[in-house]
Amino acid sequence: MLTFSRIDQLKAEFKGATILTAESEGYEASLKRWSETAEKRAGAVVQVTTPEEVATAIKFARKHHIEQVIRGSGHGTNGASSTKGGMVIDLSKMNRVTVDPENMTIAAEGGCLWKDVDEAAGDYGLAAVGGTVNHTGIGGLTLGGGYGTLHGLVIDNLLKVKMVTADSEIITASPEERPDLFRALRGAGANFGAVVEFTYRAHPQREPVWAGLAAFPLDKLPTIVKFANDFALAGNPDASFNFGFTMPPHAPGPMLVTLGFYNGLGIDGKKIFAPLFAAGPAFHNLGPMPYCKVNALLDESAGHGGRKVIGGAACGIPFEPQFYEEIKQDLLSFIEEVPSAKESLLVFELVHHGKLQEVDASATAFANRGPYYNAVCMTKWNDPKDDAKCRSFTFRLKERISEHLIKTAAVKPESVGKYLNYNDLTDGRSDQMFGSHDEKLVTLKLKYDPDQRVRQMG
């Protein structure tokens, strides 16, 4: 815990960084997180602007035995970016993006949001592989694997990182420099230090693309499930499709919601998603749009505020209508029991997994390479008294979906069938998230962080 005298010492160490404490203007705002369940009252928030300042903060925390956490965007629900009484090293002011169109690279500082990257790359007719909610930070999503809509995983398009280790050393990790660490960073999260800059491979991006949301009455589920099966079997690498259940903003009640994306001409996009139009959506905004707007389509549904928890699982084809009807009823029954959870979201994400499976499983620490898709339940509620109930429901639901995958699809031996970034609800066993990679990761953790100082980046 940071004492008053330690805070005075901390302030003396810095000249450029802003240090916020309980009496500072801006302190309360600095504690805000995407989910209220992840908020804690820090002893000090150090808003750094350079790698050197990050190193100074880490060194100070280590010397004085102060708990430290790294805040990227604060988008997780497990509290990894917050500390009670300790030090938050806040990267949010490190948000510069540098696009190199000649070498087709994008360098982004660790405090960037995907919106920053999408818009900077778009100015050059380029795109990085990024998340599907653009107010998510790049750090946590990248280091956990990172699913987007095109070109495979984010980590498969990551060229190098600059980071500060647990012993305050500023280093680079890439295929040429510290390849063992670079392998671990791609999929095992921020367990080895604070990443202060990511360099991504850029891709030419045509404009506009064809995408949008569509909402349907719940009784259209059999039609949407049939379309999902047909879409998955078609295996179009330029298209993705999400479907699930939520209460969209301004809707009177829960609905079946879809998100379609096609990286091509509108005439072809309309053909691919024609069955959705035939099903008679109550609302849709499917049509041409800039690529950078695609990652904003879910921003309102996945907005800041409220209490949240995320649970993820994998799902595979064939999607069975009866099973998804049962899952829908589970969610609706829970919302009846906890009315403030009406904005909860359950989504099945059909992102083409061809590129993902082209990369050898041993090349990274990512343990979810397989011919299946992600499911994510974001339970959202308001009253702290419902915390345990909502966490329990989310865990049960994601476990039920996982069990169904084992029955209906082949899970590869080297894969765990779980996506790290969607699994805040675990029993703490690393082998359940990293599978066959676990032993190497433990050895590397002892090399780079023997005192277990580094936690996940949030």
Image: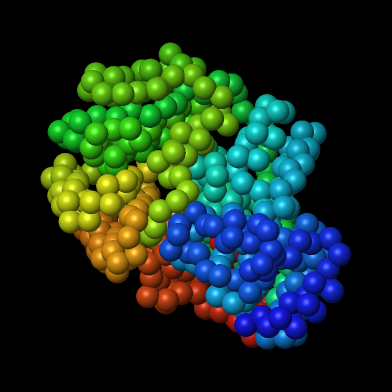
Q: Is residue 315 above or below residue 23?
A: above
In the rendered structure, the answer to whether residue 83 lies left or right of residue 406 reads right
**Residue 186 seen from this side:** no
In the rendered structure, the answer to whether residue 311 lies left or right of residue 180 reads left
Instruction: Give me the residue at 72% from left, 28% from top.
Output: 124
Q: Position of residue 179 (x, y in %)?
A: 70, 65
Q: Position of residue 138 (x, y in %)?
A: 61, 51
Closer to the camera, 27 or 252?
27
Closer to the camera, 291 or 152?
291
Quarter of the image that includes the N terminus: bottom right
Instruction: Give me the residue at 67% from left, 54% from top.
Output: 92
Q: Position of residue 217 (x, y in %)?
A: 20, 31
Q: Quadrant of residue 245?
A: top left
Instruction: Give me the residue at 54% from left, 57% from top.
Output: 32
Q: Is residue 12 above or below residue 106?
A: below
Closer to the camera, 296 or 178?
296
Quarter of the image that includes the C terminus: bottom right
Instruction: Give me the residue at 26% from left, 23% from top.
Output: 281
Q: Quadrant of residue 407?
A: bottom left
